[in-house]
Amino acid sequence: MKQCKNFLIIANDTKDVNLTISGRLKEIIESLGGTASVIGGGDYSDRHIDTAVMKDIDCAVIMGGDGTMLRASHSIEDYDIPMIGVNLGTVGFLAEVTKEEMEPMVRRVMDGDYKIEERIMLCGSVRRGDTVIADNLQALNDAVIARESALRLITVRIYLNGQFFDEIEGDGIIIATPTGSTGYNLSAGGPIVNPGARLLLMTPISPYSMSSRSVVFGAEDEIALEFVDKRKNGMDTGLLSFDGISNVIMNIGDIAEVRVSDKSLNFIKLDNSSVYQKLRRKLGG
């Protein structure tokens, strides 16, 4: 693979206080003949990284947990550079290495001794009647329609490629990528799949039916989720969230359309173990 020499370090300064660990990583990179710049801050979803900063960058190193990885991914999704995570959080499914492994990680990436794993993303929009009220919503992990706050059911009518598929009552629905299969999807009882696969997962959240189960769709399938009014005591508004970053209030009759995005992200892989072996290490069993 390409030998990376110029690095952008994106750090969560609530987990890396005073950017101490990021500063150490910068020193390691420079001692090995590379260059590095550090961007600090906890929220990167709304942070624009200027093209001048991204010029000649070969690799982004994300310092934090899975939340930091998600936010940072939205900041670099328009730049064709790979990313790798250093876990400063708890479980850290998306991160590749620990802080104790930073130096060997840098050496391998600078030598081109790594693999690239392409991760698909989601793209979505919301229609209210004939009007598109939200467009170009992107997600690396998942798109979720959920009740806003009150402990009442919502009903979502599902269409697959323009045809009615199902109707689910419950707390909501998750549409997850393979990357997101170990996130909210896993907590809701959905399956775990290889993060490099090309498919979509749909998992109901606390469904009011014993027959509602997770469903796997192809990457070419398009899913429409209509927020409908079925019960007198049901919710009349819901929340659509892409990665917990882009959020849209949905009213009865609104339709969210979700498909695989034209964009994708490249993750640097150093570990040859599978996602299933990683799960055993991180969750036990």
Image (tube, rainbow, N blue to C red):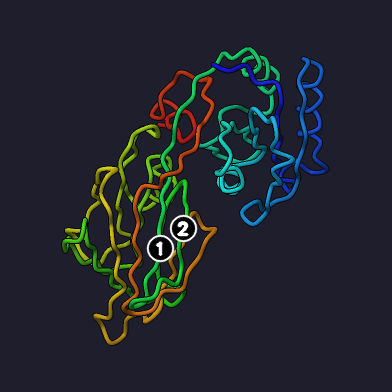
Determine the secondary structure under disc 2.
strand
**Residue shown at 68% from the left, 52% from the top:** 48
View extreme (bottom): residue: 232
Where does residue 17 sit, x and y in percent of width and height? Answer: 79, 44
**Residue shown at 76% from the left, 29% from the top:** 36
- For badge 2, the amino acid type reads Asn
**Residue shown at 74% from the left, 40% from the top:** 53
The residue under label 1 is: 125
Where does residue 216 sit, x and y in percent of width and height? Answer: 25, 45
Q: Is residue 16 above or below residue 246?
A: above
Q: Is residue 189 above or below residue 266?
A: below
Q: Quadrant of residue 35?
A: top right
Q: Are marks 1 and 2 in contact (CB under 8 Å)?
A: yes
The quadrant the N terminus occupies is top right
Residue 136's tag is: 2
Q: Is residue 218 above or below residue 7?
A: below
- Front-most of residues 17 and 72: 72
How far apart marks 1 and 2 lie (CA) works out to 6 Å
- Front-most of residues 101 and 135: 135
Determine the secondary structure under disc 1.
strand
- For badge 1, the amino acid type reads Ser
Residue 175's tag is: none
Badge 2: residue crowd in 10 Å (few <14, some 14–19, many ≥20): few
Where does residue 242 sit, x and y in percent of width and height? Answer: 47, 57
The quadrant the C terminus occupies is top left
Badge 1: residue crowd in 10 Å (few <14, some 14–19, many ≥20): some
Looking at the image, is mark 1 or mark 2 earlier in the sequence? 1
